[in-house]
C-alpha cells in the first residue's frame, strides 16, 4: 500500500502533511511512500530528507494521485476542490486524510462521496482521551494562538512588558483574549510571557481555572451561560439577543485594551459577532484587533479575511492561516497527529476502516459513495430543506 503526500496547492499554504521523521515512525507498518517533488520545501524539509527515509520522490503530480492508496494532505488539493473530483485521477476507494472543514463546506463532502473516495476529516475526530494524540485542530490552534500574539505585538506601537529605565517607567500593554479554547489559552500564555497584563473571557465558566492558572484575569459578564458548552466541549451557539447584550458589555473591555484577540467559533455556523463598529471606535488609537475567526465571518464587524483594516486609528487583522506562517513546527505537529491516526488504522500494511471503532467512525466523512458523517448529513438535509 502506498501513502501519497502531495505538495499543498491552497494559496499561501506552506505546511506538508508528513515530515521525514513521520516516515521513520510508519516504516514498521509495511507501507510505501510517494512524496511529490518539493512537497516539504516550504516547510524546511527537502526531497533528499524524504528519500533518505525510503520515500519515492514523484515529479508527476497526476501519477502521485493515480498511484496512492491513501492520500495525506493538510488542505484539500485543488484537484479535489474541482466540481468533479473524479477528474483528479484518483481511483474509487482511495482514502484521503486531511482538514476539510466539513461542517462549513458540506457540499464538498457530497462531491468527494460521488467520486467514490473514503475521506477522513480530522475536524470530526471525536474528543476522547484515546484520540488526543491525533487532534490536529488542537495542534494547529496552538500555533495560531501563539502567532496571533506576535502579529499583534509587531503591529502595536507600544511595548508589551513593563520596563523601568533611566528615562522612566513604561507601563505594560493590556491584552484582552476572547475565547479560552486551545488558541485562546496559547494566546494568553504567549502574551503573559511577553509581559502584558492579560484578561480573558469565555462563555464557559468551566475554563476560568485554566485562564487564571496562566496568570490572566478571568472577566465575568452579567450573562446567563448555563448551556454555553456542547457535549464535545465546544461553545454552543446562543440567541441573537444574547449576542447583542454581549456586544454591549464587550465595548467597555475593548476600550480598556491595547490588543484584542478573538477566537470565538461555533462549528458549522457563522462566527458570533462580538465587537461592533462602536466598540472599535471606542478603542485607543494604535490599538490592534487580531480576529482568528475571520474565515467564518469574524468576531469583529470590520474584519476582512487576510486584509488589514484601519478604522479610527485602530488596526483590525483577520488572518486565516496563521499555522502556515510557522510551517516547520506546524507541519511537524500535524504530521504527528496524522501518523498517530495511521498507526491506529493500519493493520498488516492495509488501511482498516473498522466502523465499529469510535475513532474511525467519528472521523469518517465519506465512504462507499455516501456522506456518512451524521452531523454533515444533517447539515446537507437542512440546506436542502432551505432551498426547497
Image: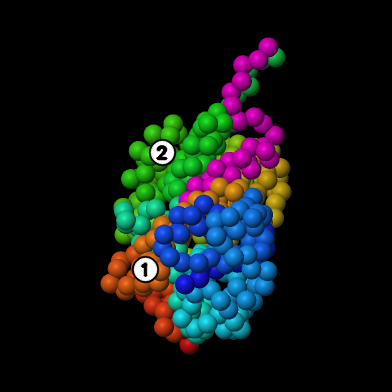
In the visual, does 233 lie left or right of 114? left
Q: Identify the residue at horizontal 33%, vertical 45% (top origin).
A: 206
Disc marking residue 95: none
> Which quarter of the picture shows residue 294?
bottom right
Is disc 2 placed on a helix, strand or loop?
Answer: helix
In the visual, does 288 lie left or right of 204? right
How many C-alpha atoms fall within 10 Å of the one at disc 1: few (<14), some, or many (≥20)? few
Q: What secondary structure prevails in the magenta region?
A: helix
Q: Is residue 52 visible?
A: yes
The residue beneath circle 2 is: 211
Does 271 sit above or below residue 356?
above
Task: Residue 171: give x, y in percent of width and height.
Answer: 60, 24
Q: Residue 145 colored magenta?
A: yes
Tell me if label 1 and label 2 are in contact, CB under 8 Å.
no
Whichever of callouts 1 and 2 sits on the residue coming sooner in the sequence is 2
In the picture as drawn, the residue positioned furthest to the top comes out as 166
The number of callouts visible is 2
- Which of 274/355 is in front? 355
- Which of 326/288 is in front? 326
Task: Residue 322: give x, y in percent of width and height.
Answer: 60, 51
Q: Identify the residue at horizontal 52%, vertical 42% (top origin).
A: 187
Give the CA separation, mark 1 to mark 2: 44 Å
| Magenta range | 139-166
Task: Residue 135: give x, y in percent of width and height.
Answer: 42, 56
- Which of 53/346 is in front? 53
The residue beneath circle 1 is: 348
Q: Is residue 246 visible?
A: no
Indicate which label's residue lies in the foreground, 1 or 2: 1
Task: Residue 279: give x, y in percent of width and height.
Answer: 58, 47
Q: Residue 14 colored magenta?
A: no
Amino acid at each position: 500500500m502506498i501513502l501519497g503526500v502531495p505538495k499543498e496547492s491552497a494559496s499561501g499554504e506552506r505546511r506538508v502533511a508528513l515530515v521525514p521523521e513521520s516516515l521513520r515512525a510508519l516504516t514498521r507498518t509495511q507501507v510505501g511512500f510517494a512524496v511529490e517533488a518539493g512537497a516539504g520545501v516550504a516547510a524546511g524539509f527537502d526531497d533528499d530528507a524524504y528519500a533518505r527515509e525510503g520515500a519515492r520522490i514523484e515529479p508527476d503530480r497526476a501519477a502521485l494521485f493515480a498511484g496512492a492508496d491513501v492520500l495525506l494532505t493538510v488542505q484539500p488539493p485543488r484537484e479535489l476542490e474541482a466540481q468533479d473530483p473524479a477528474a483528479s485521477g484518483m481511483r474509487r476507494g482511495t482514502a484521503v486524510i486531511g482538514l476539510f472543514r466539513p461542517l462549513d463546506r458540506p457540499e464538498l463532502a457530497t462531491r468527494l462521496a460521488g467520486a467514490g473516495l473514503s475521506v477522513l476529516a480530522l475536524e470530526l475526530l471525536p474528543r476522547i482521551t484515546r484520540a488526543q494524540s491525533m487532534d490536529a485542530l488542537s495542534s494547529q490552534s496552538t500555533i495560531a494562538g501563539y502567532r496571533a500574539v506576535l502579529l499583534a505585538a509587531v503591529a502595536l506601537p507600544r511595548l508589551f512588558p513593563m520596563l523601568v529605565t533611566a528615562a522612566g517607567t513604561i507601563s505594560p500593554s493590556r491584552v484582552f483574549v476572547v475565547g479560552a479554547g486551545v488558541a485562546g489559552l496559547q494566546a494568553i500564555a504567549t502574551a503573559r510571557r511577553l509581559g502584558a497584563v492579560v484578561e480573558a473571557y469565555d462563555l464557559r465558566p468551566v475554563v476560568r481555572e485554566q485562564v487564571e492558572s496562566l496568570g490572566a484575569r478571568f472577566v465575568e459578564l452579567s450573562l446567563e451561560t448555563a448551556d454555553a458548552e456542547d457535549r464535545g466541549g465546544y461553545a454552543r451557539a446562543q440567541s441573537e439577543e444574547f449576542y447583542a447584550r454581549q456586544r454591549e458589555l464587550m465595548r467597555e473591555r475593548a476600550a480598556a485594551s491595547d490588543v484584542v484577540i478573538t477566537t470565538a467559533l461555533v462549528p458549522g455556523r457563522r462566527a458570533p459577532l462580538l465587537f461592533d463598529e462602536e466598540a472599535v471606535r471606542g478603542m485607543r488609537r494604535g490599538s490592534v484587533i487580531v480576529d482568528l475567526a475571520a474565515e467564518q465571518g469574524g468576531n469583529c464587524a470590520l474584519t476582512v479575511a487576510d486584509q488589514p483594516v484601519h478604522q479610527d486609528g485602530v488596526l483590525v487583522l483577520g488572518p486565516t492561516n496563521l499555522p502556515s506562517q510557522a510551517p516547520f513546527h506546524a507541519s511537524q505537529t500535524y504530521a504527528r497527529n496524522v501518523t498517530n491516526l495511521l498507526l491506529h488504522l493500519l493493520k498488516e500494511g492495509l488501511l482498516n476502516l473498522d466502523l465499529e471503532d469510535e475513532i474511525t467512525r467519528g472521523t469518517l466523512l465519506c465512504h462507499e459513495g455516501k456522506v456518512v458523517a451524521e452531523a454533515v448529513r444533517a447539515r446537507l438535509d437542512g440546506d436542502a430543506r432551505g432551498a426547497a
